[in-house]
Image (cartoon, rainbow, N blue to C red):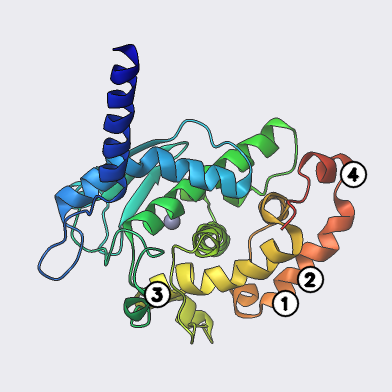
Amino acid sequence: MVILKKILLLVFLIVVSFTQCSQDYPRNKEGKPTSVGISNYITENKYHIIDEVQLFINEPIYDIEIYSDDLREYTSHDSLELGRTYIPGEIILTTEERYVGYELKSTPNFKKKNLTYDDKFVKGVLIHEIYHCYFNQVLREMKMMGFIVSSEYNNIVYVPSHEYGFGAEFMEEGFCEYMTFNMGECIRDKREFKPKSIEEIKDPNNISKVKYEYALSFVEPIIQRYGIKYGMAVIIRNKPPSYKEILTPQIYYDRLESGLEKFPVQDSIALSKNPE
Ligand SMILES: [Zn+2]
């Protein structure tokens, strides 16, 4: 009898896990995730997605709370916003029906071909927001350990200089986008946008192209060269890029490299390079 119960329980668990795996989340007439679907997807997958990120960076991220809600009802919402993070760890993803799908990785290849950088997925947006929490965690860790932190990263909202404040935001967004792309949950266009003048950087029509798309490829060589965590430390302890440096990345990269000599040895040990 006991054995029979155990078998029944096992069968029940297998059926439950099978139905959970094969569950298809609802889509609207345009094939986009519905508000209810987005909400269910977040509730059912958030811990798993946090785990995936932690596994990817090989480090825990502390105290994250994830919710979904209609961000249009929140203050200072702009039309580009799909997710927002209240530092240190509260994430809200919008339930508006604006994502093209739930997960990029599970999208069939023939559909992937037609996607552009602006096509966002629920999972990709969530991963991007989780990396904001991680960015801030590393910043706090550096401060606690007594390392230099460039003040512009300290509290992006209150930065007095608009130019370097922009630079700090640009680097953080670029980092989050690059990591999301690295995890296979963000599309990159073959021809990426590259600003040619300061006016193009400041142009309100280019916000998303500069601060996300171009920032991704700007941050990429830094993480590739120094690793994830050490690369973040290199970014955070240096003054953010100016507009001129954003236009000519090599000047900024050289500045980072020349600053390395000033790193106390223990910094390099404590924030050891991630093998990639
Ligand atoms: Zn962001």
Q: Which mark is residue 265?
A: 4
Whole-percent x, y for residue 268 in the image: 83, 46
**Residue under circle 1?**
250
The residue at the far left in this view is 29
Quick one: label 4, few (<14), some, or many (20+) residues within 10 Å?
A: few
- The three-letter amino acid code for the residue at tag 2 is Asp
Task: Give how far across and how far down residue 170 sits, in percent.
Answer: 53, 63
Label 1 sits on what residue type? Gln
Name above or below for residue 49 compared with residue 89: below
First of labels 3, 4 by sequence position: 3
Dot 4: element: helix
Q: Earlier in the sequence, mark 1 or mark 3?
A: 3
Say which residue label 3 marks.
117
Residue 147 location, quadrant:
top right
Residue at 34%, 80% (x, y): give it: 110
Residue at figure coordinates x 77%, y 51% from the top left: 273
Q: Report the side of 82 relative to 189 (left or right).
A: left
Question: Can see residue 67?
Answer: no
Mark 4 vs mark 1, CA separation in Å: 25 Å
Q: Is residue 57 above or below residue 10?
A: below
SS state under label 2: helix
CB of mark 2 within 8 Å of CB of mark 1? yes
CA gap between label 3 and label 4 equals 40 Å
* Count of numbered labels shown in the rendering: 4
Instruction: Find out if the beta carbon at label 3 lies less than 8 Å from the nearest ligand 1 atom.
Output: no
> In this orientation, which residue lies closer to the viewer: 245 or 97?
97
The crowding category of the residue bearing disc 3, from other C-alpha atoms within 10 Å (few below 14, some 14 to 19, many at least 20), is some
Q: Which residue is mark 2?
A: 254
Element type at mark 3:
loop
Residue type beneath disc 4: Val
